[in-house]
Image (spheres, rainbow, N blue to C red):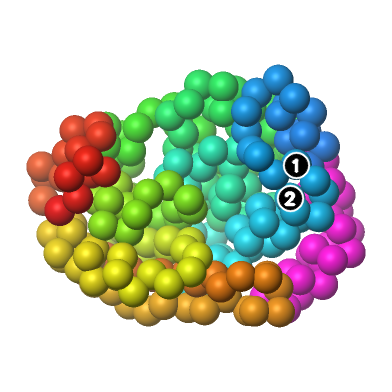
Amino acid sequence: MDTLKSGAAKLGINLTTEQIRTFETYFNELTEWNQKVNLTAITELGEVRDKHFLDSLTAAAAFDFHGNPSVIDVGTGAGFPGIPLKIAFPGMKLTLLEATGKKVSFLLNIVAELGLSGVEIVDGRAEEIAHNPRYREKYDVVLSRAVAGLPSLVELTLPFCSIGGFVIAFKKGDITGEIVQSENASSLMGGMAKEIIMVNRELFDDERCLVVIEKILPTPPQYPRRPGMPEKRPL
């Protein structure tokens, strides 16, 4: 975990001893639950540390999470990237959205086990929850990691984003094609591409980036479309 501390420091995040202990507890719970629930294929300490914990923290390169922002993690799975960011920036208000019941059970357990406050866990699909007034256009930041291709992803995420807020999508490899293909969907959702931030190559052995989209106009009420449509028929 010393490597997590030094890696986070390269991202401008100074983790305390207590925060490192919290990450250790997270890892232990994750691997224990993973023996009975399929949470992740990555279970070795070094890989969890780098590919889940540290990768999640790279979002700090795209947004300053110190100001107690409201954040939703769409398709969070076992809590990535939302929970690592919450550990590092405890003041943020976090919603974890997940549609798989067993993963929701893990999230309820781990949030309690880690003693995290200001975290809401929502069981449901983005296509449906985004039409709920409680969540629609309520967030400063919408996070999504390994959920869908960018053309589909903007329809699943931008409806949650408030005007002036941002979607931060975690991507790997050459995403030039995805960027071009997502322009129409992004525009329809009220978004505008802001920047692509390359992640520090010292931290990973592959090419990673953060795609940042700003919300500039309200999302039309018909979006997102019914469950499955954003991925089956990208706009």
Q: Is residue 16 magenta?
A: yes
Which secondary structure, mark 2? helix
Residue 92 percent location from the top left of the image: 56, 55
Judge from the rendering whether residue 232 lies leftward or rightward of residue 119; answer left or right. Answer: left
Judge from the rendering whether residue 46 lies leftward or rightward of residue 93; answer left or right. Answer: right
Residue 56 percent location from the top left of the image: 61, 58
- Residue closer to the observer: 65 or 106: 106
What residue does disc 2 label? 48
For residue 88, what is the image quadrant? bottom right
Q: Residue at x 56, y 22 (%)?
A: 102
Q: Residue at x 46, y 34 (%)?
A: 98
Which residues, given as a range, are shown in magenta?
1-26
The amino acid type, in three-letter code, at marker 1 is Thr
Give the numbered dot on residue 43: 1
Say few, some or many: other residues with alpha carbon within 10 Å of mark 1 (under 14 / 14 to 19 / 20 or more): some
Say few, some or many: other residues with alpha carbon within 10 Å of mark 2 (under 14 / 14 to 19 / 20 or more): some
